[in-house]
Image: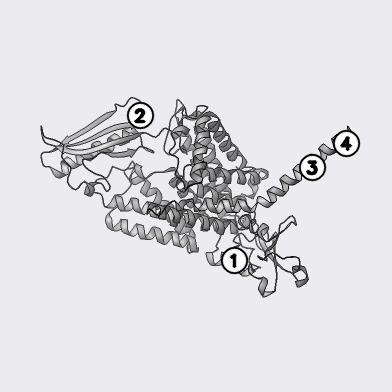
Amino acid sequence: MTPSEIRGWRRHAALAFIIAWVAIQIFVPFVQKFEIPSFRYRWARFGWAMYSRLVPRYEVRLFRIRPGGPPEPIPNIERYVRGYRSPEPMPMLAIYVSEDEVHDRFSRLVSYLARERHDGYTYVASIRWTSYPPAGVPDVVEFRATE
Amino acid sequence: MPRNSASWFSLVPAYRLATLRVCLAVTSLVFHVPKFNRFIDAYTSSAYHVPPPLALVPPLGQGAGAMLMMLNYGAAAGLLLGLYPRLCAWFLAAIGFYVMTLDPEYYAHNAQFHLTLLALIGCSSDRLSLWRLLNAQQHDSDETCPAWPERLIQVQLSIVFFYAALDKVFNPHWGVSGAVLATLAVRDHAPGLASLQALNQAVIRAFPGAVSALTTALEFFLAVAFFFRSLWRVSIVVALAFMIYLEFLLRPGVFAWDTVAALIVFVPSADRSWRLMDNPQPAARRWSAALLLRLDWLKRLGSVPIDAQHCVGDTTWLRLNLVSPRGREYRGLAAVRMLPIVLPGPFFVVMAMARFGGGFLGSLGYGPWYDLPFIGLAGWLLLWTPSAMRIVARLAHEVVARGVVGTGRR
């Protein structure tokens, strides 16, 4: 006779998986969306918040300078980050990332470039927020690094 | 949990999950894997990386990256063919989540949804290869598997729509202002559809608050409706219409396609309740069992041989004759228009290939081929025109008849 439902350890394992899955799927987006303990709403990545915010746009210029000199292109920038250009501005969207993550990415990048190249140049990332800039952030933010 | 929680561990026909698996494999092959392989390629060929949010996440080297890219295609192909499908699905899901943790720029909601569905389809034990699905054996409709992965997919859909709606309630850019709607980067379309898009945009800009409230209400409705079997039929229609609209407006990666694929878990299967009147005369076998029964992945069609005498009435050149579960007979074009309803799996695959194949051609500069599914959809809706006109004519006739009777009384 063919059984009509699963029984035994398979059933217990499936039940444990179901409870864990549903709990995670409910709990994680909730705490991402509502800051605990204040339960204040915030936009968050893992919160199923599709098309939920005005997407900030920004331009980044990556270049290097000598003291008193003009901006120069960073040689082989493609080798450091595929798709990046220098020194012309690169239009970008901050769809799923916060302004802190954007700033962190480029401040780390110029530090890395200065450390790697170690050529006395100052490496600069100039970020200009063009549309829907995050609240409290200046329109232009610049990061510099020299080794 | 859905109302009938006792049925989570019962055995149900395996054809729904197998069909969903094939649909997800197709969207993986045409969209997800190429996109994530591009991410892997970009990551491994860059010297600089942002530190991953979790220190335990290992970085990806060039050799390992190349291997992962090949394995991704292999896993998607395995998922499609039904070769170690659970392993393939979990592999794709795990690698996808791993890539998303390498760099926040690789995250996307549509990717998260796709990976979530892959993980859930990895729980399915349907044991039905693509070959078995394509097998037209009439007796092959008794394969079963546990229901809980299906139920979990239903719950997952509910959760996604619930949180999407909840977000719109609390978000100052949605709510009653609908501010975000005016800023959406709507998609370009071919001439004709472009005019429809312009009209659509004009409506959104004129009534952003109303559109925002309607979207929120729609998402809440779907979140609730997926829990109640009595609302499944209407929720499928509403969700399908919503996803078609979303695809038309924004073309949001693979999200709309995955949602449509996931709706398969709400449809009946293995009931053989649609009857395909099979005419044994060779000239009339254009739409024979050899084709339609092979496309019947949900095993809804039962082939019924009919005698030559019965065939006399079937004069349409298509020689296609379908009888619905309620006993309504469809012939010729009327039967053709029912095929996407009876055979949703293969139609999904064709439409997804048209969309993403067309998108690929569009990206090469060959024009807006990504609109192919909308042309197919328009053609399908056109097939409903005679019926719609008949209903309108009947209603008009009834109204006129009542008017005449009313005038006569006076």
Q: Say what amino acid the circle numbered 2 marks.
A: Pro
Mark carried by residue B294: 1
Hey, which residue is sitting farthest bottom in the picture?
Answer: B282
The reply to whether discs 4 and 2 touch (Cβ–Cβ < 8 Å) is no
Have a look at marks 1 and 2 and say if they share a chain: no
The circle drawn on residue B408 is 4
Which region is colored magenta? B138-147
What residue type is disc 3 on? Glu
In front: mark 2 or mark 3? 3
Q: Residue at x 31, y 58 (%)?
A: B66
Q: Amino acid at mark 4?
A: Gly
Does the magenta portion include B144? Answer: yes
Q: Is residue B8 magenta?
A: no
Secondary structure under the numbered disc 3 in the rendered image? helix
Most foreground residue, B176 or B162: B176
First in sequence, mark 1 or 4: give its number.
1
Q: Are marks 4 and 2 on the same chain?
A: no
**For mark 2, what is the residue?**
A134
Instruction: Look at the image and tell me in which quarter the C terminus of chain B lies.
Output: top right
Of the pair A113 and B383, the residue shown nearer to us: B383
Dominant SS type (magenta): loop
What percent of the width, then of the height, locates residue B390? 72, 49
Viewer-side residue, B82 vs B174: B174
Q: Position of residue A16 (x, y in %)?
A: 53, 47
Crowding at label 2, few (<14), some or many (≥20) Cα neighbours within 10 Å?
A: some
Q: Residue at x 38, y 38 (%)?
A: A95
